[in-house]
Image (cartoon, rainbow, N blue to C red):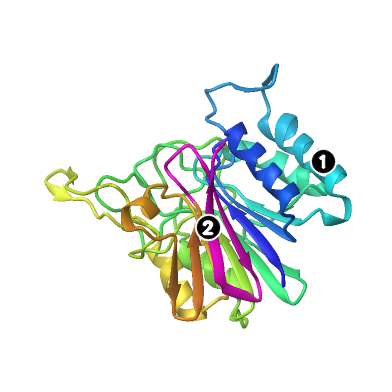
Amino acid sequence: MIKAFFVTDLHGKIGRYERLFAEMLNDPPQVLFLGGDLLPHRLRPVQWGDEMIENFVEDYLSKRFLKLKEKMRNNYPEVFLIMGNDDARSEEQYFIDGAHHGHWQYIHQKSIPYKDFIVSGYAYIPPSPFQIKDWEKYDVSRYVDPGCISPNEGFRTVDPPEDIEHGTIAKDLELLVKEKDTSRTVFLFHSPPYRTLLDRAALDGVMFEHVPLDVHVGSIAIKRFIEKYQPLVTMHGHIHESSRLTGQWRERIGQTFAFNAAIDTPHLSLIKFDFNDPSSSERIVLDI
């Protein structure tokens, strides 16, 4: 058995993090996945006890994971994380530094061996209506849904390190997998796959210039990727309300078990699963 915890879209909420750490001490996992949108809003100060946190990664996350490592000792899990579309890419170096210090592994656009499995990560989402574009790319083409803003517009906190003009999520994923056997690969995405139980947004009846908006807002590229390569497990977030609207937080896509751990209530949504038996996965919703 390889027990894994998966959380996402914590958005810098101290209560959610502290509840996660308490659960890890109570029921230690061997692996922890954090699926992006980990930081607080850039303009909102965060208070931890009597301290005002200026740099969330350095002043809170790194310190808390170090303390957790001291408490858990040999039970400290492998921690894999990516960023999300609400996380300013100007903060990415702090996550990379945290990886160098051994707090976690930063796996955006990486594939890393773990026991008899491979763990891969990918943070980009398709074009959205939001202005910040650090973690957005065209999906399968340069088409942008009505009401959404092109990745070439909006603003970025850093210059893009990749070709945004011609790059797509679809191309990135093909490069990431390189035609390998993915039947024992676990993928950590931020975006959910398109037209599934995991990407349902609250857009019913919403129009943009007389055009009804699609209520499914996930990635076509990620959906096609899952259908083609059939990884063991895929993890997703981004669409907080999807599980409330569909009543489901997981979906079977062929042989792949896909999970969305995001939630739109002030709780911690925690998915627990076993690498060797993902069909036994469960979601628990914890008060904070």
Relative to 275, residue 180 above or below: below
Neighbour tally class for label 1: few under 14, some 14-19, many 20 plus, Cα within 10 Å: some
Residue 30 picture location, percent across and down: 75, 61
Would you say 86 lies left or right of 107 here? Answer: left
Q: Badge 2 is on which residue?
A: 283
Q: Name the foreground residue: 36 vs 146.
A: 36
User: For the residue marked with disc 1, what is the amino acid?
Assistant: Leu
The quadrant holding residue 193 is bottom left
Q: Position of residue 268 (x, y in %)?
A: 54, 44
Which residue does the image show at 63% across and 74% down from the upper left?
185
Mark 1 or 2, nearer chain start: 1
Q: Which residues are magenta?
A: 262-288
Q: How many marks?
A: 2
From this view, report whether residue 25 is shown above or below residue 6: above
Q: Which one is closest to the eye, mark 1 or mark 2?
A: 2
Looking at numbered disc 2 in the image, what kind of residue is underneath it?
Arg
Quadrant that contains the N terminus: bottom right
Residue 227 sits in quarter: bottom left
